[in-house]
Amino acid sequence: MSNSSVVKNIQETLHKELKNIGSFEECSLLNYPDYLNIGDHLIWLGTIFYLTDVLKTKIKYTAAGSEDFSEEVMEKQVGKAPIILQGGGNLGDIWINHQKFREHIISKYRDRPIVIMPQSIYFNSTSNLKKAADIFNSHPNLTLFIRENFSYKIALNYFYKCKIIKIPDMAFCLLNMSCLTSNNTAQKSSILYHCRADEELKQNFSPASIFELPNVIVEDWVSPEWKIWRSSKSIMETSQTYPDSTPAIFDRLYDPDIHRISWILMHKGIDQLRQHRLIITNRLHGHILCILLGIPHIFLANSYHKNESFFETWTHQVPFCRFIKDSSQIKLTAQELLDLYSNGN
């Protein structure tokens, strides 16, 4: 199956299942990724474009988390309109601040629909999982989108009073954007080891064989120092370098500058990956962005089931991707992909 067919099928499934959200004129969209993880900004943008372009919903309030969330402002802006919570890989107790904010919102606002966009689930502690389940199951109108099979089974077992729907990641809503045209890697020589080094790094993985490959560069997502850049005028100056920006959409949203920041970070991620002929990544959205850009890549496991389960659920048919469990297989697999796609095939 060709890559275009695979990705088109994924997006069609995404749009089909998203219809379960229902129809509403306005909403709040919470848990903006006010930090440097380009993958979460891809999710945010995919959600923005779906809600505004497809669902024709007005996003009248946004907030990142407990530090900038205002009950009074949200009530003034949207009343009892539905609350949409950002998707991602933070439904669990690895990234506990996200989970605490999510549980607070679900506990407090039982008088309106709440939708959690596509998430992966992982709890180290069963007691934390049961606590979350009690809170979720107590809400009378909670829809929980789950983005891979392993997490879907957890959701069915624990969040049984919620409406649970399996669905791909929201970043696939970005398909066919002009900045994601197919990428020819034939004239590029470097290999990028795109490696996260945070709580989701698989600790027993040995990267030694990666460094046996020629011209390897090691980077995580590249961007200016977040706190300095986030608070400076350089954000808007940087946005001028991307002519395919869509300011008309962002201007109609609450707090338009944060959406422009996500747009800029998406372009930085695109620019970063396009510099290389092959990517080796342990980031889920390194994998997804490579698919959208058509870049040959090797996909590695993270610290729990997320990466492998997502690959097995949705992307295992992508022709220029290989999922590797055993690091000893990386060198031969990399050479296979380089041989297959050295002419931009």
Image: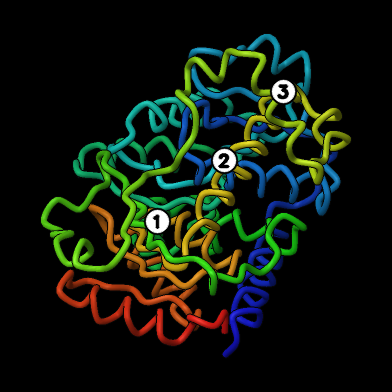
| Callout 3 secondary element | helix
Which is closer to the viewer, label 3 or label 2?
3
In what quadrant of the picture does the N terminus appear? bottom right
Contact, CB < 8 Å: mark 1 with mark 2? no
Q: Residue at x 66, y 44 (%)?
A: 45
How far separated are the C-alphas under marks 1 and 3?
41 Å
How far separated are the C-alphas under marks 3 and 2?
17 Å
| Callout 1 secondary element | helix
Q: Is residue 60 left or right of residue 293?
A: right
Return the residue found at the far right.
248
Q: Pick whichever of labels 3 and 2 is earlier in the sequence.
A: 2
Q: Position of residue 331 (x, y in %)?
A: 23, 75
Residue 41: mark in rendering: 2
The one of 78 and 135 positioned closer to us in this rendering? 78
Q: Which residue is mark 3?
A: 236
The one of 184 and 160 positioned closer to us in this rendering? 184
Q: Judge the density around disc 2: few (<14), some (14-19), many (≥20) Cα neighbours within 10 Å.
A: many
Q: Pick whichever of labels 1 and 3 is earlier in the sequence.
A: 1
Q: Residue at x 29, y 37 (%)?
A: 93
What amino acid does circle 2 point to?
Answer: His
Q: Judge the density around disc 1: few (<14), some (14-19), many (≥20) Cα neighbours within 10 Å.
A: many
Q: Relative to 47, is 332 above or below?
A: below
Q: Judge the density around disc 3: few (<14), some (14-19), many (≥20) Cα neighbours within 10 Å.
A: few
Q: Which residue is mark 1?
A: 155
Q: Position of residue 6 (x, y in %)?
A: 59, 79
Q: Pick whichever of labels 1 and 2 is earlier in the sequence.
A: 2
| Callout 2 secondary element | helix
Q: Relative to 113, is 107 above or below?
A: above
What amino acid does circle 1 point to?
Answer: Ala
- Residue 141 can be seen, yes or no: no
